[in-house]
Image (cartoon, helix red, strand yellow):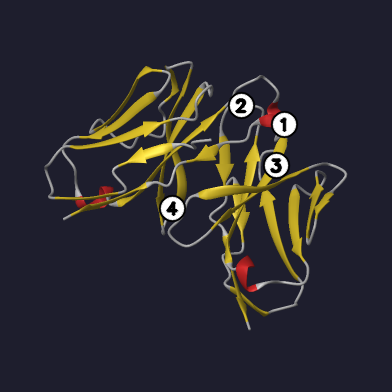
Amino acid sequence: DAGVIQSPRHEVTEMGQEVTLRCKPISGHNSLFWYRQTMMRGLELLIYFNNNVPIDDSGMPEDRFSAKMPNASFSTLKIQPSEPRDSAVYFCASRLRTGGVSKNIQYFGAGTRLSVL
Amino acid sequence: RKEVEQDPGPFNVPEGATVAFNCTYSNSASQSFFWYRQDCRKEPKLLMSVYSSGNEDGRFTAQLNRASQYISLLIRDSKLSDSATYLCVVNDNTDKLIFGTGTRLQVFP
């Protein structure tokens, strides 16, 4: 049973370049979350989707960040232009949203480790 | 004040020891609670949910005190493989999970 799949696993780029991170949620899950993790700030929610619709993007740091979910099995997080302070691990997580809060269990992908030089 | 606060540690304990982690949360409307485990350079994974009456899963026991807005995790008979960061997670009846910054545990032989 495949879990959440993220690509690439590692990305090294230069300041000013466009970066695209990809995520395939668990099949059948209808909520998808993008997080960023740094030593200083821990795990921060950037944006999440329910049924492919963006619900809350208040965690997106600035306009350089954008996310899309064109269908139930694919999402992208794009940074353009990238800056050194964007260096972090970016996680995607998915969940089957059934309405019961006790089941609000999210499953994480292995993450993309981004380094912006 | 952070929404979920944890002692960052590290907690360094010998094999076989009992260790306890604490967590406090600020939103009294929080509905569900979890402990996630994160190994070095890996993703967070659900360790256990935390129920009002407290619950146990093998060597792990989780407790919730709603009045004090306090959650705990007890690990008995620590194993080397328990070395990881333990994340306290709170949900306030929305889709969002709020993660603490984690408590690092290192179990030594």
Q: For this view, does A70 lie left or right of residue A12?
A: right
Reading the image, the residue beneath label 3 is B33
- Of residue A76 and residue B7, the one placed in the foreground of this image is A76
Mark seen at residue A102: 1
- Of residue B66 and residue A27, the one placed in the foreground of this image is A27
Residue in the picture at 84% in, 41% down:
B52
Q: Are marks 3 and 2 in contact (CB under 8 Å)?
A: no
Cα distance, mark 4 to mark 2? 22 Å
Characterize the local packing of mark 2: few (<14), some (14-19) or many (20 or more) Cα atoms within 10 angstroms.
few
Q: Amino acid at mark 3?
A: Phe
Cα distance, mark 3 to mark 2? 13 Å
Say what secondary structure mark 3 lies in.
strand
Q: Quadrant of residue A106?
A: top right
Q: Horizontal and vertical percent for residue A5?
A: 41, 37
| Looking at the image, residue B33 lies above or below residue B95 | below
- Count of labels in the image: 4
Q: Chain of mark 4?
A: A
Q: Amino acid at mark 1?
A: Ser
Cα distance, mark 1 to mark 3? 8 Å
Q: Amino acid at mark 2?
A: Thr
Q: Residue furthest front?
A: A1
Mark seen at residue A41: 4
The mark closer to the camera, 1 or 2, is: 1
Characterize the local packing of mark 4: few (<14), some (14-19) or many (20 or more) Cα atoms within 10 angstroms.
few
Residue in the picture at 52% in, 60% down:
B39
Reading the image, the residue beneath label 2 is B94
Q: Chain of mark 1?
A: A
